Amino acid sequence: MENVVLIIHLLLALGLIAVVLLQRSEGGGLGMGGGGGGAISGRAAATALSKLTWLLAIAFICTSITLTIMAAQKSAGSSVADRIGVPQSETGEAPEAPAAPLGSDLLPPSEGDNAPLVPSAD
């Protein structure tokens, strides 16, 4: 069921992208500029593309909420910390943390060390 909703969600996303790109540009961003085109009215006529955009947007939001609810039900009662599975010692206590490496362990060997970095092909 989750896969069906996910496929519908992806198709709605692609449809929404296509419908938005097909619409005529209204001019500059944030409502600046724009062509008057004769009769300037405060409310633009709702075209078929704008109605379709609203329909696809509402359906997209509904599928988003549905997928969120499905994911929440699937993971109910579980936590990421529960899935880590920290090993415990025989006494039931958590094992001690390993010691932090010394600063000299992090540096590359110096020229004075006997062990070569790359084995020779002798």
Image (spheres, rainbow, N blue to C red):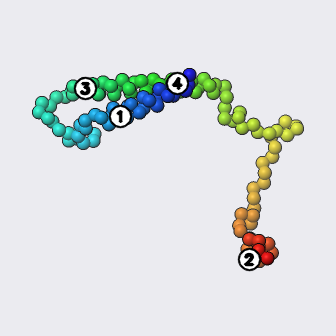
Q: Which residue is mark 2?
A: 111
Left or right of 93 in this view: 106: left
Residue at x 62% of width, y 25% of height:
74
Q: Amino acid at mark 2?
A: Glu
The disc, 2 or 1, on the residue closer to the chain's N-terminal end is 1
Query: Secondary structure beneath disc 3?
Result: loop
Q: Amino acid at mark 3?
A: Thr
Residue found farthest to the front: 122
The percent coordinates of residue 95 (x first, y second) are 81, 43
Vertically, is 56 above or below 113?
above
Q: Secondary structure at mark 1?
A: helix
Relative side of 77 to 31, left or right: right
- Residue 18 badge: 1
Query: Does label 4 or label 1 sit earlier along the sequence?
Result: 4
Q: Which residue is mark 3?
A: 47
Q: x and y percent of residue 51 in the render? A: 30, 24
Q: Residues within 10 Å of mark 2 (few under 14, many from 20)?
A: few
Tell which tag, 2 or 1, sits nearer the viewer: 1
Amino acid type assigned to the residue bearing label 1 in the image: Ala
Mark 3 and mark 4 residues within 8 Å of each other at the beta carbon: no
Q: How many angstroms separate mark 1 from mark 3 (CA)?
A: 16 Å
Which numbered disc, 2 or 4, marks the residue closer to the eye?
A: 4
Q: Which of the two labelled residues, at mark 1 and mark 3, occupies the earlier sequence position?
A: 1
Q: Nearer the viewer, residue 43 or 2?
A: 2
